[in-house]
Image: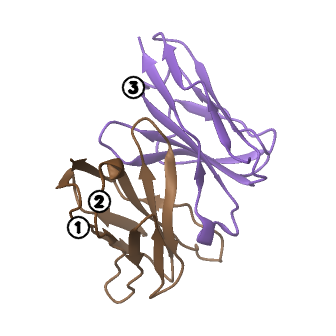
Chain colours: A purple, B brown
Amino acid sequence: DGGITQSPKYLFRKEGQNVTLSCEQNLNHDAMYWYRQDPGQGLRLIYYSQIVNDFQKGDIAEGYSVSREKKESFPLTVTSAQKNPTAFYLCASSIPRSGLAYGYTFGSGTRLTVV
Amino acid sequence: GNSVTQMEGPVTLSEEAFLTINCTYTATGYPSLFWYVQYPGEGLQLLLKATKADDKGSNKGFEATYRKETTSFHLEKGSVQVSDSAVYFCALSALNYGGSQGNLIFGKGTKLSVKP
């Protein structure tokens, strides 16, 4: 079955470390997205990519970086410059031109905790 | 710009009660509208959608009607169950100037708790 896989489900990071969250999809979707969710908060867009080898900053890109070398993969790196990285991170994908009617497909999320 | 406003939660209901979660939007043109559901510790799942005015989306007993005149897309269910306890997000997708696909814009979410 097609879907989006995020790994790991839980991740612990020491202060000052970079960590990378994995997101892989086999839906043949062109567009991929990263969101951050804090307790009791909505979703905030970090980065998105409409096509391979291209990506744009979202609303809260500072302290994060991404790459899009393959259509299937959109890893997110949380750098030491991100002052408050503890949150739930969600990856999503869509077909950009059809997304108007189909919305996004989401992964099951990665919970990152700074220890 | 485009935006979505949802009623604030949390909403607490008894089993078999009627549910309404209000959602209004601001958008240029004719957006598509969505309701997503998030169960504890999980990602978001598409619950239902509507792509044009007066369309009714429905799934698992939930319904929402795209009302252009009131710019609303309220979520309703006639009889909620304990298993409906989750966070519900209203969202819209609209075209940008030039016809390109805009990103999905989410409301802040409404937490629903259903008691037995």
Tell me residue A63's x, y (percent).
51, 29
- Name the amino acid, label 1: Phe
- Please determine if labels 3 and 2 lie on a single subunit: no
- Name the amino acid, label 3: Asn
Q: Is residue A75 visible?
A: yes
Residue at image coords 34%, 77% = B72
Left or right: residue A44 versus residue B100 is left
Q: Is residue A20 above or below residue B93?
A: above
- Please determine if labels 1 and 3 lie on a single subunit: no
Q: CA distance from mark 1 to mark 3?
A: 39 Å
For disc 1, the marked residue is B18
For disc 3, the marked residue is A84
Q: Quadrant of the N terminus of chain B?
A: bottom left
Residue at image coords 20%, 63% = B17
Looking at the rendered structure, the secondary structure element under dot 3 is loop
Tell me residue A88's x, y (percent).
45, 33
Tell me residue A85's x, y (percent).
44, 26
Q: Is residue B6 above or below residue B52?
A: above
Image-quadrant location for residue B71: bottom left
Question: Which chain letter goes with mark 2?
Answer: B
Q: CA distance from mark 3 to mark 2?
A: 37 Å
Q: Residues within 10 Å of mark 1 (few under 14, many from 20)?
A: few
Left or right: residue B42 versus residue A68 is left
Q: Residues within 10 Å of mark 3 (few under 14, many from 20)?
A: few
CB under 8 Å between discs 2 and 1? yes
Question: Which chain letter goes with mark 1?
Answer: B
Compare residues B84 and A69 and report the one nearer the observer: B84
